[in-house]
Image: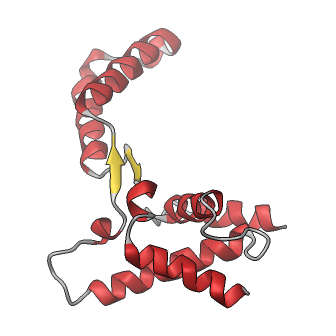
Amino acid sequence: RTMDEMSSVLSNPSNLFMIDYDVIGCTAVQEGLVVDSKYHRLKLFKAVRAFREQMELNNDHQSTTTSLDLLPRRCLDNATLEYLWDESIRLEKELVPKYFHEADQERHRQDFLTAVAKNKFCSVDVSAVLKDERWLDFFANLEAEAS
């Protein structure tokens, strides 16, 4: 049942950070910051999400930090993005040639660049998160509460 609940939570496309919460929690377990026998995955996910949301509420008074700054991101470099674009066009021509139209490429390119601008090719920088004192304190407090 827990995996079904987790799938349901993670499949919600309305929240950019949903998968990030799970990745942070799972990595904290791998790094020994949280004992997984004390916190099953969904419970840990909910705790990470609540902490991140509390950080955002506390941040509302500081206009220099955005929501994305609260979870540092790692994004693909320009060379990798260009390779991804080129491969997607090549595969489109190869796999679905009847739907490929050169005239649509400018619109596709703009859609791709919009996705890049919206950090769609980025993921949470878990290493940076787990070096942040606020997060380390959060996980230490979780462990203390569970003991």
Horizontally, is 87 left or right of 63 in the view? Answer: right
Is residue 112 depicted above or below 25 in this figure?
above
Counting every numbered tag in the picture gives 0
Which quadrant is home to the N terminus? Answer: bottom right
Tell me the residue at 33%/25% (across/down).
85
Q: Nearer the viewer, residue 115 or 108?
A: 115
Q: Position of residue 87 (x, y in %)?
A: 39, 18
Tell me the residue at 29%/39% (across/down).
111
The answer to which quarter of the image holds residue 124 is bottom left
Tell me the residue at 30%/71% (across/down).
67
The answer to which quarter of the image holds residue 63 is bottom left
Q: Position of residue 96 (x, y in %)?
A: 50, 16
Q: Residue furthest left?
A: 64
Q: Position of residue 113 (x, y in %)?
A: 24, 39
Is residue 110 depicted above or below 142 in this figure?
above
Q: Position of residue 22 (x, y in %)?
A: 59, 62
Is residue 53 depicted above or below 2 in this figure?
below
Q: Residue furthest right?
A: 1
